[in-house]
Image: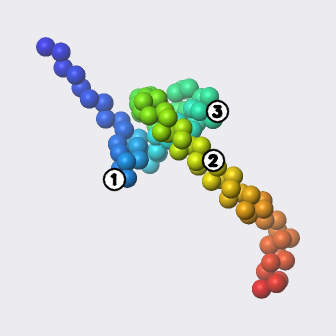
Amino acid sequence: MLVVEPITHIRLDERGVAWIADSNVKVIEVAMDHSAYDWDAEEIHAAHPHLPLAQIHAALSYYHDHKTELDGQMERQLENYQRLRSETGGPLTRAALQARLQDE
């Protein structure tokens, strides 16, 4: 008799966000590394050595199973980042910070 053992490297929180089990890493974070840098599982493991390869492969599998949804989330996060960055006008220099403190 063939026994199939479920793999449980991914868990969903109460909001439906996918996390790598027993870690504080979201699946979307691994997906971003894969998508943005074109990293494979070995390269992602080098960047996140605390994650076993099996968990990284599970995260990538989850990503590919939910690619449209996760790509949309990544695009919205990038747009939000770009919007916030444009609203702040760039990094605050030491001189600008000192000028602001003197004005207060």
Q: Which corner quadrant of the image does residue 104 belong to? A: bottom right
Which one is closest to the eye, mark 3 or mark 2?
A: 2
The residue indicated by pointer 2 is 78
Q: Residue furthest left?
A: 1
Q: Is residue 49 left or right of residue 55?
A: right
As drawn, the label of residue 14 is 1
Q: Which corner quadrant of the image does residue 2 belong to? A: top left
CA neighbours of label 1 inside 10 A, class few (<14), some (14 to 19), many (20+): few
Which one is closest to the eye, mark 1 or mark 3?
A: 1
Q: Residue furthest bottom?
A: 104
- How far from the left and from the top, in percent, is residue 32? 57, 38
Q: Secondary structure at mark 3?
A: helix
Residue depicted at 78% across the width and 65% down the height: 92
Q: Earlier in the sequence, mark 1 or mark 3?
A: 1
Residue depicted at 46% across the width and 29% down the height: 64
The residue indicated by pointer 3 is 37
In this view of the protein, can residue 101 be seen by the observer? yes
- How far from the left and from the top, in percent, is residue 60? 47, 30
- How far from the left and from the top, in percent, is residue 34? 57, 32
Residue depicted at 69% across the width and 52% down the height: 82
Q: Are marks 1 and 3 in contact (CB under 8 Å)?
A: no
CA neighbours of label 2 inside 10 A, class few (<14), some (14 to 19), many (20+): few
Q: Is residue 83 left or right of residue 68?
A: right
- How far from the left and from the top, in percent, is residue 22? 37, 44
Quadrant including the N terminus: top left
Q: Earlier in the sequence, mark 1 or mark 2?
A: 1
Amino acid under disc 1? Glu
